[in-house]
Image: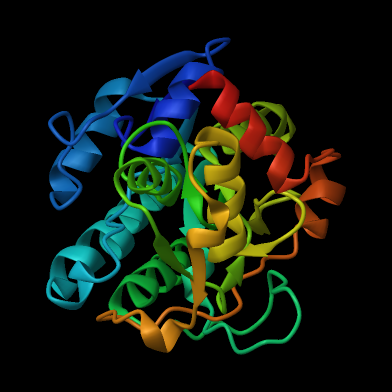
Amino acid sequence: MKILITGINGQVGHALMRELTDHELIGLTRQDCDLTNSDQIKQVIDQHQPDLIINPAAYTKVDQAEEEPELAFQINRDAPKVMAEKACEYHIPFIHFSTDYVFDGEKEEAYVEDDPTHPLGVYGKSKCAGEEAIQEVGGLNYIFRTSWVYSNISHNFFLTMKKLSQERYELKVVADQIGVPTSNQFIAEQMKTIIPQLHDNNTGAYHLVSDGSCSWHEFAKQIIGQTNPQFNLENLHAITTDEFPSKTKRPKNSVLNNAKIKQTFNLEYNHWQGELEKVIHEA
């Protein structure tokens, strides 16, 4: 199968290129295809005529999006819509990655796929608009929402905690936001299993996250405890969201329920802690 993958310098795109080697892969960077240029997106797809389009590329700077809403919507809404339209034209599947930030975090339990969306900031609104645009186009489209993505590359919480624990004597981490840490490798491994099962009777939205959940503080404790035994974990202080100033309000509860994806594609998952250990060991 010929698979076109966007954003291969990002966390998920990088892992997909590494994992899906059984297929003919066309990996696109920002230089290969400018996602703010609809004509270029169409030209690249026409040029390669893939059997599947996967779009992990996104505008992900949550705070900066408040100052660059137009750019965020171009990349997170308009570009995926064009890809979905081209996929429809070629009668091929389109896989798009979305986020826990389409929800407001006010729900007590884990979010299921058909819960009402209510994003809090520009980033979440642009990703939500992307989902809606894809669904309006129709066709063989798949939206995989994930959360708290981390890896050994790029900018993410895992690498930040590793670095700060080496540089500082004490750290403060938010303890009243909960979610599901999800590694890029986990996402790519599940995609390898899911892709052969894509069929016109299982299109739609799915929550692609590991099992379990935790707070940012708990996540930090696991990261530092396993990567920097010299750091005294008593100096890792739990704070509230209100004590951590941010331009953008973030969801308090962004735990995604993964039962639907497991059942549909017959997947067996690791707990997020097991996935973290795998990432640490590959570093």
For the rendered model, the colour scheme is rainbow
| Position of residue 270 measured from the top left corner of the image (x, y, whole percent) | 78, 40
Q: Image quadrant of residue 63?
A: bottom left
Tell which of 138 and 173 is nearer to you: 173
Q: Quadrant location of the N terminus?
A: top right
Along the line of sight, the residue nearer the viewer: 50 or 242? 242
Image location of residue 161, percent across then percent down: 41, 48
Residue at 46% over, 47% down: 88
**Is the residue 129 above or below the residue 17 in the image?**
below
Image side of residue 172 versus residue 46, left or right:
right
- Specify whether 206 is left or right of 170: right
Q: Residue at x 17, y 28 (%)?
A: 32
Q: Is residue 113 visible?
A: yes
What residue sits 48% from the left and 18% below the top? Answer: 18
Q: Quadrant of residue 55?
A: top left
Can residue 96 be seen at all in this image of the molecule? no
Q: Residue at x 62, y 48 (%)?
A: 222
- Which sits in the foreground, 265 or 103? 103
